[in-house]
Amino acid sequence: HDFAQLSSILSQLPARERELIAFKYGAGLNNREIARLTRLSESNVGTILNRTVEKLRIEMEVNHER
């Protein structure tokens, strides 16, 4: 149930956010490696990931309460 819900939320994210989440949690890369692959700055990678994870967490909580 939670996995299906997470998949649904992830599918609605912008491509760049999905890509960073996949690199970080799917491939287990660190922010420096992700920055090198995406040509973003390391701090930008960190900011986008933090914002995205927070967005996912809130969505999961909201959907869990329904």
Image: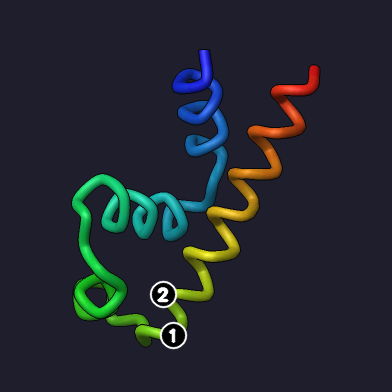
Q: Residue 58 appears in which quarter of the rendering? A: top right
Residue 17 position, x and y percent, is: 46, 57
Mark 1 and mark 2 residues within 8 Å of each other at the beta carbon? yes
| Residue with the most extreme top position | 1
- Residue 41, picture quadrant: bottom left
Is 43 displayed left or right of 29 in the figure?
right
State the quadrant of the C terminus. top right
Q: Which mark is residue 43?
A: 1
Where residue 60 appears, x then y in whole percent? 64, 33
Q: Amino acid at mark 2?
A: Val
15 w.r.t. 38: above or below: above
Q: Identify the residue at horizontal 62%, vertical 55% (top origin).
A: 54
Q: Position of residue 22 (x, y in %)?
A: 31, 49
Furthest residue toward right: 66
Q: Would residue 16 be found to the left or right of residue 29 on screen?
A: right
Coloring basis for residues:
rainbow
Mark 1 vs mark 2, CA separation in Å: 5 Å
Q: Nearer the viewer, residue 8 or 61?
A: 61
Q: Secondary structure at mark 2?
A: helix
Q: Residue at x 45, y 22 (%)?
A: 3
The mark found on residue 45 in the picture is 2
* Mark 2 neighbour class, 10 Å CA radius: few under 14, some 14 to 19, many 20 or more: many
For residue 23, side relative to residue 45 (left or right): left
Query: Where residue 37 sits: x, y (%)?
Result: 20, 72
Classify mark 1: helix, strand or loop: helix
Residue at (54, 53) in percent of width and height: 53
The answer to whether residue 45 is left or right of residue 25 is right
Q: Is residue 50 above or below residue 22?
A: below
User: For mark 1, does the 10 Å Cα neighbourhood hold few (<14), some (14 to 19), or many (20 or more) residues?
Assistant: few
Q: Amino acid at mark 1?
A: Ser
Residue at x-position 45% and y-position 74%: 46
